[in-house]
Amino acid sequence: MPIYQTSTFVQEAPGVNKGYDYARSGNPTRATLEQLIAGLEKGSTGIAFGSGLAAIDAIVKLLQSGDEILAVDDIYGGAFRLFTNVYEKFGIKVNYVDTTDVANLVNAITPNTKLIWLETPTNPTLKISDIAAIAKLAKANRCLLCVDNTFASPVLQQPLALGADIVIHSATKYLGGHSDLIAGLVVTKEKELGDKIKYIQNACGAILAPFDSWLVIRGIETLHLRVKQHCASAQIVAEFLEQHPAVARVFYPGLPSHPNHAIAKKQAKGFGGIVSFTLKEDTEEAAVAFVTSTQLFKLAESLGGIKSLVSHPANMTHKSIPAAKRRAAGVSDSLVRLSIGLEEAEDLVNDLSLALEKTSQVIRQTTITVHQ
Ligand SMILES: Cc1ncc(COP(=O)(O)O)c(C=O)c1O
C-alpha cells in the first residue's frame, strides 16, 4: 500500500472526486488500515485515530450529559484520567466495578447507564471478564458494550463475535508491534454506529497520519506470528515466576492458579504476552530495585512490542489513579508488569532470575542499614 502523503485531492468538478477530497475526512492509506482492522475484528467499520486515547475519547463523545459509564475497575490509567478529569465536568458519571463477576454489573447498572467499558485482559492485573455474558446484559439494558482489545489483539479474541458493539485498540501496542508509533483503532459491529463515530472523528479531527497508518499495516502483517511467540514465552516466564521464592503472586491468565483461567480458555485462543507479579517484599522500593536491575527487559512505558519491557504501574501507567483506589483494584505497591518480547524465553528467564537475586540483595542491605 503506498503512503498517500497528501492533505488534499484534485477534484474533477466541485464535489466530483475519486472518493477522497480532504485527508481529515479520508485518506487511502488510512482507509486500507481501517478496512484491514474491520476485517480482523469481524466488524463493519474501522476508524483509525492518532492514539488509543483519541479512540476512547471518540466513544465517550457518543454520550450526553447525564449518561453513565459502567467501567472495569482495573482500567488503564489514561482511560480513568480521561473519564474522571475530562468528562465528569461535562456531566458524565462513571461507576467502576469488578467486571469479572457479572453480578457486580447487574447491581451497578442504572437506567442512565449508556456504555459498559471493558478491558479484558485488564492492565496490569490481567483480569478476564466474560464478554458474551456482559454483552447479553448490555443488550437487555439497551446500552453499548465497548471492549478495549489491546492486550488480546484480534488474533486471540474477537469481542464483536461475542456480542460487543465496539472494539477499541491502542494500536501502539501489538498491532503496530515495533514500539515506533502511536495509534488507535475503533471497530464497530454496525455500520450506523461506525458512521456516527466517523462523524465525530471528522468533526473533532483526531485522525491517524498516512505514514503511521502504513506502519500499522506493516505491523499487522506479522501479528499472528508475533502473538503466537509472545504467548509461548509468556507462559514459560509466568511458570518460572510462580515457583520463585521472592515472588508473592503471578498474574497470568494461562496459569491454572489464575482466578479467571477457565473463562480465558473459553473466550480466547491464547493468554497473551503480558505477565504481572508482586514481590513478597511488597514495597515500592523493592519494585524499583527490581525494575532497575533487568538487562533485556528495558524499563519503559508501553507494551506489545518485539522487545521486552518492564514497568512499575504504581509509579508509571497508574500514577494518576489515587493510591487507595489503585490498591483496591489489585495494583499493589510492588506490582511489576512485564511485556514479553521476541527474545529467547531462556534468556528472559535468566534476566529475571538475576534481577530477583539483585533485588533480594538490595532488600537485605536496606534491612541491615535500618537495624544498624
Ligand atoms: C489497554 C490500553 N488501552 C488504551 C491505551 C491508550 O493508548 P495510547 O497510548 O495509544 O493512546 C493504553 C496505553 O497504554 C492501554 O494500555
Image (cartoon, rainbow, N blue to C red):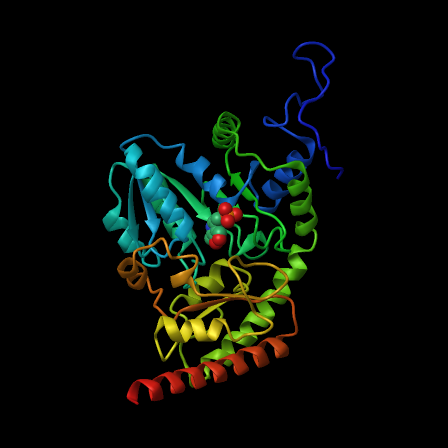
On the image, the x and y values in percent for residue 25 come to: 59, 26
Q: Is residue 114 above or below residue 226?
A: above
Rendered-image quadrant of the C terminus? bottom left
Vertical placement of residue 12 versus 151, above or below: above
Instruction: Identify the image quadrant of the N terminus.
Output: top right
Count of labels in the image: 0
Front position in the image: 204 or 151: 204
Residue at image x 30%, y 64%?
A: 327
Q: Is residue 55 above or below residue 234?
A: above
Residue furthest to the right in view is 2
Location of residue 71 in the rendering, given as x and y in whole percent from the top left corner: 34, 48
Residue 129 is drawn in which quadrant? Answer: bottom left
Which residue extends farthest top?
Answer: 13
Observer able to see residue 161 = no
Residue at screen point 31% across, 84% down: 370
Percent from the top left, x then y, of residue 367?
Answer: 34, 85
* Camera-side residue of 359 and 29: 359
Q: Residue at x 38, y 69 (%)?
A: 259
107 sits to left or right of 364 = left
Please, is residue 293 above or below residue 168 in the view?
A: below
Q: Does residue 212 show up?
A: yes
Res 285 quadrant in image? bottom left
Indicate the position of residue 152 as horizontal and vertical percent values.
52, 56
